[in-house]
Structure formats: structure tokens, C-alpha cells
């Protein structure tokens, strides 16, 4: 399941809820394409120092990190799927600014 985010500027992003195969295979590189270069650098360096072991961990939490980063940058949840996503990601929709 995918959920959508919309920025006030009109940009829309989608994030999958759950396991990330792209992060499993490519480590921190997908974060660069998601517009999160600091996350990408951090996880890429962590993978280099742990010989890729961190890729096994980040593939389970990478989509949640992406969603939290988008919410912090002003994106708003739109569409369906937020009832499930908010529980999995630990986001209270009532706490989000309107």
C-alpha cells in the first residue's frame, strides 16, 4: 500500500508502507532520489563501515524515516491509507498541523 503526501507548493510524493526492496538492494542510495541526501549519506557510510549489515536494518524502517522527513518538511497526508500508515509509522494525524 502506498500513501500520498502533498506539499503546499503542489509537489506530491508517495511512500510505501512496510518493507523497502529498493533500500534492501541499494542501501542509502534511494534516499538521494527521495530528496533526503543527509539520510542517504548517513546510511551509505554506515553500510560501508558495517559491510552492508545496516541495509538489513534500514530496509524495515526506511519508508517510515522518509514519511517522517516529509511531514517535517511541510508535506500533508492526502488520499486513503492513512489509517493504516499512521499506526505503522507512529504518526498521530491529530497532532499534524492543519
Image (cartoon, rainbow, N blue to C red):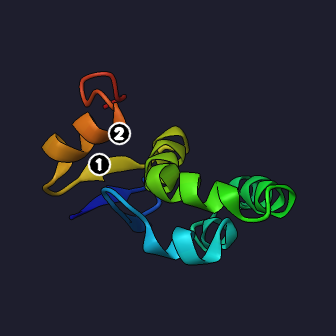
Q: Mark 1 or 2 closer to N-term?
A: 1
Residue at image point 28% right, 40% down: 88
Q: Note whether residue 93 is visible.
A: yes
> In this orientation, which residue lies closer to the viewer: 58 or 40?
58
> In this orientation, which residue lies closer to the viewer: 89 or 97?
89
Give the image location of residue 38, x and y in percent.
76, 53
> In this orientation, which residue lies closer to the viewer: 30 or 77?
30
Give the image location of residue 79, x and y in percent.
17, 57
From the image, state whether disc 1 or disc 2 is nearer to you. 2
Mark 1 Cα shell of 10 Å, populated few (<14), some (14-19), many (≥20)? many
* Residue that badge 2 annotates: 89
**Disc 1 on helix, strand or loop?**
strand
Q: Is residue 91 left or right of residue 20?
A: left
Q: Choose top left, top right, bottom left or bottom right for residue 97.
A: top left
* Residue that badge 1 annotates: 77
The furthest residue to the top = 95
Amino acid at each position: 500500500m502506498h500513501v500520498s503526501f502533498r506539499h503546499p507548493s503542489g509537489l506530491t510524493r508517495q511512500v510505501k508502507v512496510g518493507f523497502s526492496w529498493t533500500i534492501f538492494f541499494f542501501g542509502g542510495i534511494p534516499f538521494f532520489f527521495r530528496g533526503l541526501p543527509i539520510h542517504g549519506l548517513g546510511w551509505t557510510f554506515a553500510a560501508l563501515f558495517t559491510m552492508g549489515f545496516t541495509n538489513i536494518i534500514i530496509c524495515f524502517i526506511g519508508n517510515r524515516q522518509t514519511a517522517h522527513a516529509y511531514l517535517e518538511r511541510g508535506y500533508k497526508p492526502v488520499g486513503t491509507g492513512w489509517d493504516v500508515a499512521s499506526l505503522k509509522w507512529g504518526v498521530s494525524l491529530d497532532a499534524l498541523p492543519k
